[in-house]
Amino acid sequence: MAIAQLVRLLVRPELVVAGYAMPLWPSVLALIILGGLSLDVEARSRADHVNASPTTPNPAFERTAASALRLLAVLSSLRSSAAAQRER
């Protein structure tokens, strides 16, 4: 997904969603978040792989998945509060 966001930034296609032009800044934000998560998973995987057996669950994946779920919860609450502001 980070690569797809990078491609969007390089190609700069015109995206229209519900009649509105989609700006590029969400792709920059997505690239930073997804790229950071990818690098984090890779680093933790390498560190944990040294002492792990093939049947051991990967703790790096579990920590990163938990971080991603927390991020989604924050984004969801921001979206809900923005929707509530629009209704007022």
Image (spheres, rainbow, N blue to C red):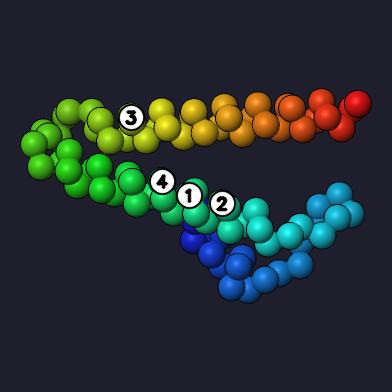
Q: Nearer the viewer, residue 73 or 12?
A: 73
In the figure, residue 25 lies in which quadrant? bottom right
Identified at 65% across, 53% down, the residue is: 26
How far apart marks 3 and 4 lie (CA) works out to 12 Å
Q: State left or right for residue 25 relative to residue 70.
A: right
Q: Do the residues labelled 4 and 1 touch (CB within 8 Å)?
A: yes
Amino acid on which the number 2 mark rests in the picture: Ala
Q: Using the image, determine if residue 16 lies above or below residue 7.
A: above
Lower position in the chain sequence, tag 3 or tag 4: 4
Q: What residue type is labelled 4?
A: Leu
Disc 1 residue type? Leu
Label 4 secondary element: helix
Percent across and percent down for residue 56 are: 17, 28
Q: Mark 2 points at which residue?
A: 30
Q: What residue type is labelled 3?
A: Glu
- Tags 2 and 1 in contact by the CB under 8 Å rule? yes
Q: Do the numbered discs 3 and 1 sit on residues whose CB atoms are within 8 Å? A: no
**Quadrant housing the C terminus:** top right
Answer with mark 3 or mark 2, whichever residue precedes in sequence: 2
User: Are discs 3 and 4 less than 8 Å apart at CB?
Assistant: no
Q: Mark 1 points at which residue?
A: 34
Q: Residue 62 carries which label?
A: 3
- The residue located at (82%, 26%) in the rendering is 84
Q: Which residue is the extreme one toward the bottom? A: 11
Q: Residue at position x 34%, y 51% from top?
A: 39
Q: Distance between the residues labelled 4 and 1?
A: 5 Å
Q: Distance between the residues labelled 3 and 2?
A: 21 Å
Residue 61 numbered mark, or none: none
Q: Name the residue under label 4.
A: 37
